[in-house]
Image: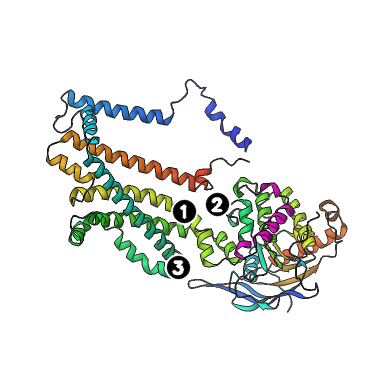
Amino acid sequence: MTVAVTAGTPGRGRGGRRHRPLPTWALGLIGLAGLVTVVELAPRAGLVDERFLPPFSDMVSALADQAATAEFWQSLLETLRGWAIGLSIAMVAGVVLGILIGGIPLLRAAMNSTIEFLRPIPSVALIPLAVLLFGTDMRSTLLLVVYAAFWQVLVQVLYGVQDVDPVARETARSYRFRPLTQVRTVIWPTALPYMMTGFRLGAAVALILEITGELIIGSPGLGRQIAVAQTSGAVAAMYALVIVVGLIGVVVNVIARAAERRALRWHPSIRGEVPR
Amino acid sequence: MTTAPIGAAARPESSTTMLDVRNLKKVYEGRGRSVEAVRDLTFTIASGELVCIVGPSGAGKTTLLRCVAGLLDSTAGEVVLEGERVTGPPPGMAVVFQEYGRSLFPWMTVRQNVELPLKEKKVPKAERQRLVREALEAVGLADAQGAHPWQLSGGMQQRVAIARAVAYEPHLLLMDEPFAAVDAQTRADLEDLVRSLWKRLGVTVLFVTHDIDESVYLGQRVIVLSDSPTVVLEEVTIDLPDERDQLVTRSLPRFAELRAHVYELIQQAKGGHRPAS
């Protein structure tokens, strides 16, 4: 191991180290600060109309106003709840059906064309159907969220189940593992990285559809608040809510990645250097 | 080693037949073409024997082993293990694969890897722990229990796979070119490990290899295969002293003779030679 490491370094060392590069998080912060500065200065300098893009400080104070209302917190809760319920249903359905379909070659062959037909249907195309079924109830939005996130998860799990190493499979067979043991000890761990990817993709798509549903159908949540703010001309408040939605997206992604790292310590993409 | 022998329980007398392969034939049916990998293989292995199977590359060694292991259906003929016809992986058998890195589960520790087949076999917990401990001690990896396989060197990983097979207490241990992917020094160590485990546990070993020296050094008997479609070319009895040593045994004149004989057979096999019948 050490041999390989030292062999790798001279290329980098030759340039001499003039200054230590900034850590990526610091660079990220600088980028964000730049964006905030532009959003703050552009309206103040008259480059854009303040009616359409208020300065950043106005958005922040509108956000503070929002945070003082019970309605905001209620809406935030509605959004998070709809998202979490939808994602959970999609995950459970996607994983169970994925393992079932992926594990039985005949079923997989039979289902392939159906999946390829249903998957590309954009979830928003189902809005009329959802409204017909459930009106402006939160269930309308839930339908969209589940439909969109389900395919992300299912397709990943199908790939994951396909990825089982033939030698690992034969090992399990040679030790006479029962089918359920094979699922638990071989198929599940192999598919887990794919499930995690499916979870991350599904989480992002679910949030998009949750907000879309609230905006268009008018089911309760932050999306509806954004529409309300827009129609009542509260532009800064509208932006404030958009920022909140964006932050939810960031937090969701961070949590998903942390969960991924924990669950996949053994996986080559996570484990990094082999200690010996 | 003072530990109680594992795997020796309830073994039949050494003169009985452990494995009987009769007129085994395997044809792979592809789209529009079929490949005859194994034409007609017949041999028997007595209980407690250590037999090596050697053949030129592409001789259908792995096909044969997979048929014996019950992982592959044969086209004709039969494999009988301890009097029972093999139709799927039989209970009294364990396989050590060449690709140790893929055969061990990276999401489990060394200990969990060795223990899993025992759990599946419903061995009681105390017994299981004893078997795992003894098997890991036997392969010299008692300290690596908590490690993950990918934290170990190739040779150590293959030791874990051997420990897993040994802890399972098989009557027949199948090894499919187990040392083809490790370096020469590790290979010598592992060869001696197989010999010592075989002696201590009294398990029957069928060892498939492409390495002529290895087959002569390890086996009591070497079955030489022809090239594909495969038949048995000759069964060579290895009349070397039972106590084998990498230096001493390999420098015996008899070792050189046997090695030369098997080498000639392999050369003939490559040239397409088949037995007169």
Query: Quarter of the image containing the C terminus of chain A?
Result: top right
Q: Position of residue B88 (x, y in %)?
A: 60, 72
Q: Secondary structure at mark 3?
A: loop
For the magenta stretch, what is the residue range? B118-147
The overriding secondary structure of the stretch rendered in magenta is helix
Name the residue beneath numbered marker 3: A104
Describe residue B200's horizontal placement relative to residue A78 as left or right.
right
Q: Position of residue A127 (x, y in %)?
A: 20, 56
Identity, as a three-letter code, of the amino acid under mark 3: Ile
Residue A200 visible, this angle:
yes
Q: Please name which of the two marks, 3 or 2, marks the residue nearer to the observer.
A: 2
* Chain to which mark 2 belongs: B
Q: Nearer the viewer, residue A242 or A273?
A: A242
Q: Nearer the viewer, residue A139 or A187?
A: A139
Residue B123 covered by magenta stretch: yes
Above or below residue B222? Residue A86 is: above
Q: Position of residue A40 (x, y in %)?
A: 23, 26
